[in-house]
Amino acid sequence: MAAALLARKVGMAQVFGDDGRCFGVTVLEAGPCPVVQVKTAAADGYDAVQIGFGPVRRRAVNRAQAGHFEVAGVEPTRHLREVRGAAGETGEVLSVAAFEVGAEVDVTGVSKGKGFAGQHKRHNFGRGPVTHGSHNIRQPGSVGSVDAARTLPGLKMAGHLGDRRTTVQRLEVFRVDSERNLLLVKGAVPGANGGVLVVRSSRPRIRKPRGQR
């Protein structure tokens, strides 16, 4: 079973390793996360745990939510998420101690919204020749055919960019601070500072024999 936590993105920083190298890390305020509900395949059709994050006053939740937390025997939280395949018991409080330095984690969150973007920014297109008289420096190119007499669906065109649920896989845990509930992971994670993320242990890699897809 995988370890999982809800976290808040604090920001990015630079830290130095024992060998003197500098690394860019993301600082996450992870947990403590009480387990509010445990779902099983026998009762619910799938295995998952529902965890909370961020304390909130009792009067800030409605009666249904208050009853849900009361059954679990935990204090109300602002955020609730279900994580499939995670381990935990109802009423248990999960913390950053579940992760070890050097372990790999998957971080899921909502990426930054960038509004309506052109095809070059959205799909990383290359530009045309920047020469005298050229008029296709940032043109999308052909989007149809004479025979079809229409624009075929599924083409990479301009449109909404970002603001989507995104997962960055296999980020290495650089440091675990149990006293301040901080988790430092190498690299960048989705979303803006202050966003809520799901951090869980990475699934083991399945290496296929050479020649198989």
Image: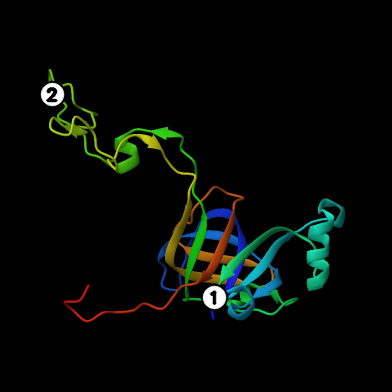
Q: Is 204 drawn above or below residue 8 in the view shown? A: below
* Residue under the image location 54 percent in, 81 percent down: 1
Give whichever of 15, 46 is nearer the camera: 46
Question: In the structure shown, which secondary structural element does the residue marked by tag 2 occupy?
Answer: loop
Give whichever of 144, 52 is nearer the camera: 144
* Side of 26 relative to 37 (left or right): left
Residue at numbered disc 2: 131
Residue 172 in the image, given as x and y percentages of width and height? 45, 70
Look at label 2 and name its amino acid. Thr
Residue at numbered disc 1: 85
Q: Which mark is residue 132?
A: none
Is residue 4 shown to the viewer in this render? yes
Residue 89 in the image, given as x and y percentages of width and height? 69, 80
Residue 70 in the image, given as x and y percentages of width and height? 83, 68
Q: Quadrant of residue 132?
A: top left
User: Mark 1–mark 2 contact, CB under 8 Å?
Assistant: no
Is residue 142 shown to the viewer in this render? no
User: Where, quadrant-wise, is the C terminus in this rendering?
Assistant: bottom left
Q: CA distance from mark 1 to mark 2?
A: 56 Å
Mark 1 neighbour class, 10 Å CA radius: few under 14, some 14 to 19, many 20 or more: some
Question: In the structure shown, which secondary structural element does the residue marked by tag 1 occupy?
Answer: loop
